[in-house]
Image: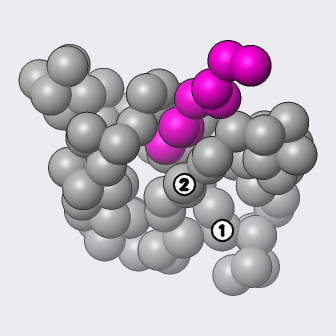
Amino acid sequence: MKRKKNLLYIGNKLAAKGNTLSTIESLSLKLQEEGFIVKTASSQKNMGLRMLAMIKAVFNNRKWADVVLIDTYSTLNFQYAVAVATLCRFYH
């Protein structure tokens, strides 16, 4: 049987802090149910701290992750998507 991929899922995981449930929170659970190993980032409410947590997650999992999924929930958060994608390309 083929090994399932290790997924690093980057996005706004803020439902526990009173925000709307986002795709990262529902899709990551579905992917785990399918047998994938999923790590997620970030649940930081402060946008700057969230960006740092996302960058740290990419750095810490650069050898572990087979795939990085970047979820942009709003236009305002597009900056972190660009930064994370650039970092992923650097480590690839």
Identify the residue under disc 2.
39
- The residue located at (33%, 56%) in the rendering is 57
* Upstream in sequence: badge 2 or badge 1: 1
Find residue 88 and name its label. Answer: none
Q: What element carries label 1?
A: loop
Q: What stretch is highlighted in magenta?
A: 1-8
Residue at the front extreme?
Answer: 1
Q: Which of marks 2 and 1 is in front?
A: 2
Disc 2 is placed on an element classified as strand
Mark 1: which amino acid?
A: Leu
Prevailing secondary structure class for the magenta stretch in the rendered image: loop
- At 49% from the left edge and 62% from the top edge, which residue is drawn? 42
Q: Is residue 7 above or below residue 28?
A: above
Q: Residue 75, percent across and down?
A: 53, 33
Q: Residues within 10 Å of mark 1 (few under 14, many from 20)?
A: some
Q: In which quarter of the image is the C terminus?
A: top left
Residue 72: image location, x then y, percent? 56, 35
Q: Which residue appears at 74% of the width and 79% of the height?
A: 16
Is the residue 35 above or below the residue 3 in the image? below
Residue 14's disc number = 1
Amino acid type shown at disc 2 = Lys
